[in-house]
Amino acid sequence: MIQEILQELIEEITVWLQAAGVDNPVVQLDRAASPDFGEYSTNVAMRYAKQLDKKPFELAEELAAFLHNKQINSLSKVEAMNPGFVNLHLAAVVKVRHLESILGAEDSFGSNQALKGEKWVIEHTSPNPNKAMHLGHLRNNLVGMGIVRLLKMSGADVTSDAVYNNRGIAIAKVMYGYLAHMKKDDSTPTDIDYWVEHKTEWFTPIEKEMKPDVFVTECYILGEQDNTANQDVEKEIRQMVVDWETGNQAVLNLWEVVLEFAYEGIDRTLNRLGNSWDKIWYEHEHYQQGKKYVETGLEKEVFQTLDDGAILTNLESDYDLSDTVLLKNDGTSLYITQDLALTDLKKKTYNADKLVWVIGPDQSLALKQLFAVCEQLGIGNRDDFTHVAYGYVGLKDEDGGFKKMSSRAGTVVLIDDVIDEVKASIRERFDEDERHDESTREALSEKLAIAAVKFSFLRSDRNQDLSFDIKQSVDVHGDSGMYVMYSFVRTQSILRKGSGSSTVVSVPSELGEEASLVRSMVYFDEVVKKSTDDLSVHHVAQYLLEVSSLFNSWYAKETILDGGEQEGYKLAIVKAAGIVLKNGMAILGIDTVDEI
RNA sequence: GCCCUUGUAGUUAAAUGGAUAGAACGGCCCCCUCCUAAGGGGCAGAUGUAGGUUCGAUUCCUGCCAGGGGCACCA
């Protein structure tokens, strides 16, 4: 409803500008900077003053007078202000009607059809099976899942996917590390054929009392160490990769066992976060297909062959990108080789309009190259391919500087460890209060910890590096997920207590203390739209903090359940605020709880 | 060397080219006889630097300073 009113106003202003002599006026209605300036403002007077040879403020006054004379009943006031803004004040009745529309739409409030009919495929959170997931992976997941939800909310048909890079040298290192270091008895030989017949002589993660992905990480680190230290081991590990490709049964068997460990652990973490994909691509199923695309490129003469036989791209002249090798001189494939095949597969399988890769910024050049080559091969249009990058998650070092996490330096922080730590501190508070029984405390602590962690990662622009300090980053006070959650809980608590009261909404002629809160709820739709345009949910998170703050201020001043004649109206505001908070949190992938 | 990217209070961090740069944490001071104080209110504190474009620049452009990433047969 608000959107229709805005559209109507834009048309009126456009017509007026055209009459004044502007050919193709661009008219925007911006959110007004403060409640004093109404709900929306337009800058057209300043923008077109020069062209119309007038002073900005005079032009603004003329426009304000024009709109005033139109007697548009959705507006209570139109005024020109220095240096040339025209401020539009929505009538109280419009804002109250908007509350009613929130109550009517409930869970679907905020949805729109802007991307109706578009098919999007979003790749995110492709986990490496050689290590447990850390905070960098967490950011990838939260950014990716957030985008998926935003696009769905805008009516797009979305498929989310991930690639399991389950073959190659890294997994071979895990396999070797397992064979060499997870034996129950040191006298057991590090021999794969022996292992096949005597598997029980090796530890399982359960026997080691380790989460399986952490167990795998341990294998990887040990395998990696041996690989660097000992040339014979390095040879053996390489041979494993070759044997795997030729289908050696023992190697395949070991491969399956360690992968099972890895993915079991990773899935546990991801399930905790509420992750889901519609499709998982397994590298071992498509990695050979890429070579065909390289051949096609050679036939089309868009690639070049180097003296040693390696195949190189030809991107300098047409794309102004540095070239990269597509096929090694020994004929084996690289990441980009496989990605050519996979991209075509995705595009065809889903008839996708847009493909998105949520991957770290270090892949920026590689993806540009991939997109360009895809275009050369006719797989798709470069403009339909998007790399959504995100800033690094670093740790604060002793002197307060930013330090990148590094598995080598042993400074990675695991997702589970962070959630558990936050959970423990929340749990402490519940134990002090003794308001809930044991199982409720446990369930609430888990939910709130995940909410706090997610919110802390999603509240800032995804491109910003994120400096992680557990005390600060997931503080449960102030601008935090807990703050929004607590605000929501308050709304639900009031609604429970006031459930017997009348819900009849009497429209006040003028808004009082509740004005700022009611006003803020007008903007939810455009916040969602902006987030969708930017493919970043942080606008929603910031908005939720604002609504929460306004709600809490109002709550402190006003007794809602006072039995007065305004009670129904006030309850409607509380309910609407609850819906806004709940739907907004849902975009962030956070389930609200009704009670803390 | 070339390309990309970031620089906002002590710290973490907002701001489709717009109005007085908005918050939180930390610091100092208030507020529970009242719907959950995991809350509310107040005070102090910020756009790396020099130019340019613009009616208007944290935002766009250029130089400089500082950080991070990438640059062909690794993943």
Image (cartoon, coloured by chain):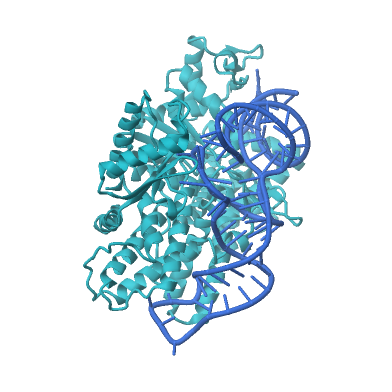
Chain colours: A cyan, B blue
Q: Quadrant of the C terminus of chain A?
A: bottom left
In the image, taking residue A538 as reference, residue A29 lies left or right, namely: left
Q: Quadrant of residue A567?
A: bottom left
Nearer to me, A356 or A54: A54
Q: x and y percent of residue B29 in the render?
A: 64, 77
Q: x and y percent of residue A202 in the render?
A: 60, 55
Label count reads 0
Nearer to me, A342 or A141: A141
Q: x and y percent of residue A381 in the render?
A: 43, 22
- Residue A169 at least partly seen: no
Q: x and y percent of residue A168 in the render?
A: 58, 36
In the image, taking residue B29 as reference, residue A151 lies left or right, namely: left
Up the image or down, A20 lies above or below A572; here it is: above
Up the image or down, A538 lies above or below B45; here it is: above
In the image, taking residue A34 as reference, residue A65 lies left or right, namely: left
Residue, x 32% and y 64% (percent of image)? A573
- Residue A553 at least partly seen: yes
Residue, x 28% and y 78% (percent of image)? A563
In the image, taking residue A402 as reference, residue A355 lies left or right, namely: left
Residue, x 38% and y 25% (percent of image)? A22
